[in-house]
Each structure stands twice: as structure tokens, then as C-alpha cells.
Image (spheres, coloured by chain):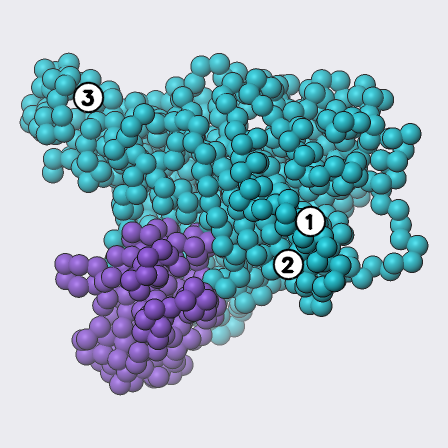
Chain colours: A purple, B cyan
Amino acid sequence: MNTNMASRQEVSFTVNGEPHTVSVFPMERLLDVLRNELGLTGAKEGCGEGECGSCSVLMNGELVNSCLVPVLQAQGATLCTIEGLAGENSLHPIQQAFLKCGGAQCGICTPGMVMATVQLLRRHPSPTLEQVREGLGGNLCRCTGYSRIFNAVLEAAGQQT
Amino acid sequence: MQTRVVGAPVPRKEGVAKLTGQARYIDDLSLPGMIFGATVRSSIARGAIEEVRFGEGIPWHEFTIVTAKDIPGRNVVALILNDQPCLADGFVNHPEEPILLLAHPDRHVLASAVAAVKITYKASPSVHTIEESERRDVIIWGEDNIFKSFRMEKGDVDQAWKDAAWIVEGEYHTGAQEQLYIEPNGVIAQAGLDGSLTVWGSMQCPFYMHKALVAITGLPPENVRVIQSETGGAFGGKEEYPSILAGHAALLAMKSGRPVKMIYDRMEDMAATTKRHPSRTRHRTAVSADGKLLAAEIEFVTDGGAYATLSSTVLSRGTIHAGGPYNWPNIRVTSKSYATNTPPHGAFRGFGAPQSLFAMERHMDVVAKTIGMAPDEFRRRNLLRQGMSTATNQVIRDPIVMDKMLERALELTDYHAKTSRFAEQNTKSSQKKGLGIAAFLHGSGFTGSGERYLNSLVGVEATATGGLRVLVSSTEFGQGTNTILCQIAAETLGLEYEDVCIAQVDTSTCPNSGPTVASRTAMIIGKIVQTAALQMKQTLIESGLLQPTGGRAEFLAACQAYRKQFGELKSYSRYEAAPNIFWNDETYSGEAYPAYAWAVYVAEVTVDTLTYSVTLDDFVALQEIGKVLHPVLAGGQIEGGVAQAIGYALYEKVIWKDGRMINNQMTNYIMPTAVDLPPIRVYFEEVPYQYGPYGAKGIGELPMDGPAPAILNAVAQATGVEFHSIPLLPEDIFRGLTAQPERPPEPLEVALAAKGSQ
């Protein structure tokens, strides 16, 4: 994609509670803007076509593949990335559960997987295993075989695993 | 032995960084003035490069362009035979072979520039399958298309056939498999005006990369530095491949004078980098009237791709594992790796063993069925037991608990009751259910004399902040290297886990502890960490700064006192072979591996005879890996390996066209998702290995070996149809179940069995 063909324009949105205005090409991928303009490199590119979910972030509370979102669509949006999840001195309960249960191995899918879990637990605060499988169905992990990720999600939901 | 830190579920060392998005992978790093590199690749399988034209519409003066002519050192990717060029020079041997490199400050203009380089070829005949290569109508490598062959023999195979009640033959095939680490390959190279070169990257083997960079650049070894960035999965796919990529980035950096980042996108990574070797295995087996294995003749062949790379060592491990965990009085294994005009196949978790063990374990069920014996009973009668010898004549001195694991697996899966129930229900239902067993082993560490050649060096040092640091080139890419090595050091010295950290792997500051492959890190490197730690303690005692009975506080204080007095406190230790390890490379006999991990897996499947799909209902994995160093990490290794092997068996098919992978996207190369996998029930038996750290053996590759044959054995039990190839997709099952019923050809196995029983 040759982004030099278009002219830059200003796009404003809120990321992890902070307002940002960036001068970008309208069809630039939200993923690239987060990573390259804002230095938020937690979201990863695994496939660039919306299959792997490693670039998952929350946009207006909805889980999106940021590699498929043209940045113009984020105008006025509220975004949450993995960098915005932990408190200053403490991990988010979901992160804590992933750490305890072994939900992260190589870690490359982890930011996306954690963000998918945030949305999953908002929709189903006490999910069944089937709901967990379904909720994480768009996030690929090659290391874990998912079992320990499921354990982590259930642990975070306060269910003993 | 009671342990405090070893065996405890301590948090992963780099876990918090990974969970908060702070871990820095290669594409998260940036250097001032950095530009971006891309690769122009061959569009044909084999032929001469006649002309390279730089097309219209691209400001070529803005680009750094590198060809083979720009290579200051040798145009090879130094590994074993050094037959692979870093950049094709006048001739290409596979699709996607790198020919020319481009770099530009704007990442986004590279794709159109790569497309604008027009290359004219004079195509030569090419070879794309094992069968084409072994026919030798076209010679594409050496004199006979053979990268490597082995012959391994025990007993007198030729004399054994006459005593057989049954002789059963079978042929088995496995396809290529993509490692599909979620982080694609990537590096950053920076060349200094002083003749220095630094490469950061996603990799398993920094010293392999270092060796390759020295050869390509011609720089003195001390000028070249390799640093591992956080690595987002590897599975063998980042063992040898990153060396060529690092070479490319280094050439661009040296020519441009700027740091160069090269990151493959998913399509390029899948099309151009290594995969698991496709294989074909032929078995001929003699069995006595009471179901004892008398002899095996096994022919194991692999498709190595266009260059030799690691094919010889993959073939070696596949050859040694070809007879499985059984007591063979007589066995002959011959093996060959053939050249084809395909990107070189390479390392992938299991390293040849998943291929030959698929054949062995599928064949065991075929033989059992032929002789009318239950698959579990047939295995029980033939399992290796303590004191017996393997196919390489290696006497197993340690206890083997395969019998126990087999019985427990049958209990846990309710095998016998379910098998009977399914047999009855399957006649009345379109949903056919079945159970399948696989019994197998996996050697820990490098094969044969390999560990002696590697001669790994490991260090520990006292840090300025009052703790201890482990120094190794053993890399973390998800398996837990950082965590287990710190656990071992802490346990050894009576420290807390938090007292010990591990250095970022950097060839300028870390000793060469060899490659991070071959299930060697826990057992081999872990042991050397233990020795180095003990030596450090000895140094402190000898210096008079520590009493032999001193505890944690005294030890840490002594470290600081020593540092104050002498400046630094470092202790290095080298690999020492366990006693009674002898290997003969000529006869391929002896102690192939210092120790083996053992396993019995059972898969339960439903085959839907309306859609021809397979659903896994249950998966039980029992293994003996010595001492479990970390229960959460070990469980995760097994589950992840089983999941990857389920993909190998049922989902992951590389589709080739003239030597090129054409489904090189996650959209059309299908790996298991969260909704596809069964519950994976993992159990460990612990038989501590005397020469491993706290009794640990290797674990990482083992779970890749067994699931595929267990699943296909279950499908055979469910459907009554024998399938001999993976991946097994619904269309294959459709073909198998709908084959013309009238005048079916008599199966070869049955024909030979009948002949043998006369």
C-alpha cells in the first residue's frame, strides 16, 4: 500500500484515557498508528489479515483487529490497548490470572488474548468453558494449546479451575 | 530429593513484561536513522538468471541495492555443508530463493519496488517430490540427489523372516508442516564505521547466526555481535533460517551505512522459510505366532528441499526413532534425504521423529489388526524394558515405566469398555467413535557425539545489585528457559527464585551454550548451570568468605564481599558427558542419546460419516520426563505440543505448486483454534534421571511425536478403514470411506500376512 498517494489528515481519539491527535494517512492501519506514531507496541502484527488476533484492541468497548481498521474509523473513538490495562503498581486481575495459570508462553499473542478476555468477561462475567472457547476463537496461540489460557480466563472470572 | 524452588510453580521470569505489552520483540525496536529492507525472490523453481531489470516508475537512486556481488565474505549460509548461498548468484534452485535485496527509509514503498524488479530466467527441469528425486531423471544436487543416507542394523534381519508367523508391510506418508510461530522472522542489523556489526533478532541460536555472519561478511568474529530480542515462538523455525535473514540485513546495513530492519510479513514467512520435512516410510515386519516382534526392515526417506541445511541431522533423529519404543531382536533401518526444488525444509519440533514415529505407531496398529491382536496387548508384548537394548544397541539402564503408563492410559480413558461400546454403537450410527493409542520415546539432547562436539559453556555471575545472574546463549521463546535455569541456580545455592535473573542473550557477553534445540536445555544446560553454581560456591568457600554451612544471606553477602575484593565473581562450567556414553558414527550404534523421555497417548475421536470430519472428544497424554522442573510450564509444553500435533494430523496441509507453497496465509493454512481442541489431559510419571539437574530430562519435542498416530489409529478403529497419510482431511476420509466396494483390491498387509502364516 503506497500511502504517499493520499494526503495526511488529523485524526483524534482517546487511547488508554489520554487524548491524542495524529497527522496520518486516512487509510493507514490503526495498528501502525498505535505502534509507530504513539509507540504503543503491545499490539502485534501476526498475519495482517485479521486471522490471528494478535493486534486486538478495544475500540469503543468492542474488540477489533487493529490491522483491519483504517485509522480514519477511529476518529473520536475511545481505544484501550494492553498498555492501559495494568494499574501503576499492580497487574489487572486478568493479567495476574494469565501469569499464575501459564496463559502466556512466547507472549506474542498475549496482548491480544488478554484484550479478548477483557471483552469476553464483560459479556459473560461467569463464562462457561464453551463461552470462553467461543470468545477466544478469533485469537490464535501456537504455544499453549489454549488449555492454560482457558484456566486463566476462568480464574480471572473468579471460578476455581 | 526434596526441593524448594525446583518443582514449584514460580512465575515466568519475563511473564509480567509479556502480559503488560512491555516485552520488546524485534518489530517493537527502532534505531535512529533506521531504514527497511526487503527481498527480491525467485519466481521459478530452477534455472539460470539471465537478466535483472529495474522497472520504470521507481526512484531507484533512493534505494540501497545488494546483489551477490556485494558480499564481502563467502556467499554461503554457514551451517553444515555450506551449500546454500546467501543470495543466488546466476542460478536459482527453488521458488522464493533470495536473489537481490532492497532497502529504503519508507517501509511502505518496498513492496512496489520489489515487484518492479524484473528478472528473466532460463528455466531448467525441476524436481518436486521424493519419488521424482529418487528416479534421478533430473539431477539437481550432487551426483544422485541424496543429501545424506544412513544404515542402522541390529541382529540378523535377513535370517529372521523364515521364523515369522506373519510378515506385514505398510507404507506411510507425512506432509510438510509450517511452524507458524505467531511472530514472523525479523532482524535489525547495524554496521559501525569501525568494522563492527551488531544484529538483533528473533531467533533460537545466536551462535549459529554469529557463525553465518562471520562467513558472509568476512569480519573478524570478535567484531560481530548477535543479540536475541524477545522471540514470539520458534518451534525449530528459528533455528537455522534467521541466519540467512541476518546475512541479508547485514549486507544492506554495511552498504547503506544505516541500521536496517527486515521483518517478513506472514505470506513471505510462510512461502520462503523452512517447514517440517515431508516423509515416506516403508515397513516390513516379522511377527511370531504369539505376537512378538521378530524383525523390522524400515526404509525412511525425507524431502529435504533444495539445499542440504539441516536435513542430515533431521534424518538422523528420524532414523534412530524409527523403531519406536519396542524391543527388536533384529532391525535394519535405511534412510535417505532427497533434494527437491522446494525451499529447504528444516528444523521443527521433533526433528524427524514425528515422521518416523507416525509410521511406526500407525504400522503397529495395522500389524495388530492383521494378526488379530488388540493394539494395547500387541504393544504390551513388545515394549522395551529396563536392560533391553534399542535399535542402536543402546542398553536402557534406567527404569522404564511404559507398562505402567500404558495401563494407566487405558484406565483413564476407560479404553476397553469404550472400545466394546463403540464397536456396537458404530454399526447403528453415522457418528463413528474410536480410540487410538500411540507409544513412543524421544531422545534428549544432541544425537550421538553431538553434545561432545558442542562442548557447551555456561556461566553464573554475582550482580552488582546483590543477586545472581545466569549467563547462557540458551534462548527463551516461550518454553520457559529463563525460568527453569533460574530455578536450578536458586535451588543449587539455597537462594530464592527472585535472587536469580538471566542475562539477555548476547554473543559478546554470554558464553556459547550451544543451540536451543533438541530438548537439550533443561537436561544438558540445566545440569551445567548446576555445576557452575556449585563451583561458584566452592570459590567463595575457598576464598574464606563463606562457610560451607552458610545459608542464603551468608552466600549473598559473600558474593558482595568477593566482588568488592576482586572486582567480579563469575563461574563458568563446561559440558561433561554422563558416564557410559559411547557412540559409533560408522555403525550408527551405541548411546544415541544420554536419556529418553517416554510416553503413551490415547486419542478418542468421532468421525462424522455425513460430513467426513473428525472431532477429538478426549486426549490423554502420559509421559515420563524425569523430574518435572516446573509443573505449569511442563504442562504447557505438553498441551502446546499436542495441539500442534493435532494440527499436523488433521488440519495443516501445505499445498504445493511447482515447489511453491500456495496457501501461504493463515486464512487458508489452518491451525487449531480455541474451539477446535479437545480437553488435553496431561499426566507425568517422575523417574529422576541421575545425570540431569534434579533428575530432569528433555520435554519440549516429545508431545509432537505421538498425537498424529494416536488420532489416525482412533479413526481406523472408528471407521474400520486404515489411513496411512497425514494430514488427514475430510476429503481424504471421504475418499477412504467411499472407495468402490465391489472387488476391493486385497490389502497388501493381509496378502502378506496370509502368505507368512502358511
Instruction: Depth check: give the residue in front, B330 or B504.
Output: B330
Which part of the image, by quadrant, shows the C terminus of chain A?
Answer: bottom left
Between marks 1 and 2 in the image, the one whose residue lies nearer the viewer: 1
The subunit carrying tag 2 is B
**What residue sits 29% from the left and 28% below the top?**
B2
Q: Which mark is residue B420?
A: 1
Helix or strand or loop: what does disc 2 sit on?
strand
Which residue corresponds to mark 3?
A: B537
Dot 1: few (<14), some (14–19), or many (≥20) neighbours within 10 Å? few
Q: Which amino acid does label 3 sit on?
A: Lys
Dot 2: few (<14), some (14–19), or many (≥20) neighbours within 10 Å? many
In the figure, residue B186 lies in which quadrant? Answer: bottom left
Residues under numbered marks 1 and 2 in contact, where contact means CB atoms less than 8 Å apart: no
**What residue sits 67% from the left and 28% below the top?**
B381
Instruction: Depth check: give the residue in front, A98 or B127.
Output: A98
Q: Which mark is residue A24?
A: none
Helix or strand or loop: what does disc 3 sit on?
helix
Q: Where is residue B411 in the image (x, y as percent from the top left)?
A: 55, 42
Q: Name the side, left or right, on which A110 lies relative to A80.
A: right
Which residue corresponds to mark 2?
A: B606
Helix or strand or loop: what does disc 1 sit on?
helix
**What residue sits 62% from the left and 55% below the top?**
B605
The subunit carrying tag 3 is B
Which part of the image, by quadrant, shows the N terminus of chain A?
Answer: bottom left
Dot 3: few (<14), some (14–19), or many (≥20) neighbours within 10 Å? many
